[in-house]
Every structure is written in C-alpha cells, then in structure tokens.
Image: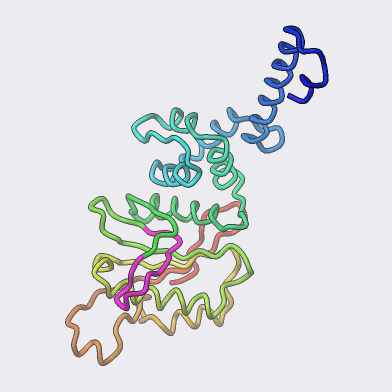
Amino acid sequence: MVKLLEGVLTIETIKKYLAEYGEERSRRKTARGSEGEVTREKMILDLTKAKVSKTVLGQIANYYRSRFEPKKSMLEMLELLNDDALTAAWKAFCKKETDQSGRFFEWRMGEYLHDRMDAEIVKFREKIVGKDGVPYEIDVTGYDKRGALIIICECKSRGGSPSKEDITKWLAATKQIAKAPIGRSLSKSCFASTSPYTQDIIKLVKGECGTDGTLKLFAAKELLLNLERRKIVVILFEEREGGPPKQIYP
C-alpha cells in the first residue's frame, strides 16, 4: 500500500501491485507449510505412509485450530489440515523431532498407546481429578471404546534423564487417580523418556512394585479396609533416536 501512495495511482499501478502482493502471499504460505524445500504435498505423502491414527491426528488439528473431518479418507483429512498442524505432525511423526513444549514426543507416545496398547481414544494434557481432589495434568490418557480410562502416560523429552522427583510425582498421581472413580478401569501407567533411565531410578520403581511389575496401590492399613485387589501395571519406556519406544521395565 505504501508503494501505491508513493507513485501515481493508475490502473496499471494497481494491477502491478496486486500481482506482486499475490506472489508474496504465495511464497509466505509455502514457507509456513514447509521445512526447507519440503512442500505440503511431500508432507502429506510422508504422513500417509506414517499412518497416524485419526484420534491422534484429530487432537493435533484441534490444538492448531485446524479443520478436521474424521469421516473422510486419510488423504482428505491431511489435505484439510492448515499449515501449522500439517508441519507439526510431519515433524513429529516423519522427522521424529522433539520440540520445546514436549508435545511432539507426547503425540508419538499417544500413537503408540493407540496402536500397541488398545487405547481407542487418546487425549493429551488432560486434567484428571484424583481421590484426594487434586487435578493432575497427565501428558497422555488412553480410553477404551466405552470411554473408560485404561492407561495414563507421563512423558519427558527435555532436561535429561528422569529424576527421582519426576518418578515420585508420577507414581503418586497414578495412585490417586487409580483410587478415584474415574480410575476404576485403569490398568496401566507408563513413564516415557527420550533420555536413558539411571539404575537408581529403575531401582526406585521396582521398590514401588511387586515382583509381577504391578504397583503397590494400597498401604497395609488400606488393604485391611479395601477388598479390591486391582493391579496397575507400571511400565518404563525409552524412545531411542529414530526408533519406536522401547520397554525398559518390567
């Protein structure tokens, strides 16, 4: 618009300006939807091969306020994604990157829970109220087809190996959620990391579990008052560069 004010306002000037403006908008749109030389078409093709589930893709679309229609084919769903959602999904699942927020790793773990651990519906950073009335923000939550919570997962992709504080908080949250009404169907609790676990951390987790790898959910006094004998399997995962999560414990 500045160019128009500086020159003579003629039909030719307006046409030239609109043409230049259109080209610039096109370049910006391509840049937002690409990584270097990668085009939208390339990212869509890569994601089609990656076979990201609709439940995870829908959550990514929702986060970036993108249009999403789960009844369409995978190709059509990907074509509907806006540039931000498409690029983020591509970086997370095709480039296997980790971002500052930790969401890329969480999405990959959500896909793993859906694909390998029977979580029909996956949600991210959901607040679950425990028996103590405290809302716990869980990185990944998985539900069965009835909508019952069956698995929770905490993820760490920044700051090095999981610390004692990280593990203690996760186990405490697991116990409170398992004892709450929403946790009646909970059967698994996972901690996933992109960095190796120290032997002290693995020993700490083992100490909180029985020989079968299930969490000691109730203290001795609670066991006398509680006839319930539910078992929560505790699992440690480690994602190694470029590969799927590897189970470290049990």
Check the picture and name the quadrant holding the N terminus.
top right
Check the picture and name the quadrant holding the C terminus.
bottom left
Asked whether 136 falls inside the magenta stretch, the response is: yes
Residue 101: % across, % down = 58, 57
| Residue 237 visible in image | no
| Residue 32 visible in image | yes
Q: Residue at x 35, y 62 (%)?
A: 151
Residue 157: % across, % down = 58, 62
Asked whether 6 falls inside the magenta stretch, the response is: no
Residue 170: % across, % down = 44, 73
Q: Which residue is drawn at 77% across and 19% down?
A: 4
Q: Which residue is drawn at 50% across and 43% down?
A: 64
Residue sitting at the far top: 11
**Is residue 179 found left or right of 166 in the rendered image?**
left
Q: Main secondary structure of the magenta part?
A: strand
The answer to whether residue 54 is above or below residue 225 is above
Q: Residue 179's quadrant in the figure? A: bottom left
**Is residue 41 found left or right of 224 in the rendered image?**
right
Residue sitting at the far right: 7
Q: Residue 20's quadrant in the figure? A: top right
Q: Residue 221's quadrant in the figure? A: bottom left
Residue 56: % across, % down = 43, 46
Closest to the observer: 116 or 154? Answer: 154
The answer to whether residue 167 is above or below residue 242 is below
Q: How many labels sit on residues? A: 0
Scheme of colours in the image: rainbow
Q: Which residue is drawn at 63% across and 68% down?
A: 159
**Is residue 202 found left or right of 130 in the rendered image?**
right
Segment colored magenta: 128-141
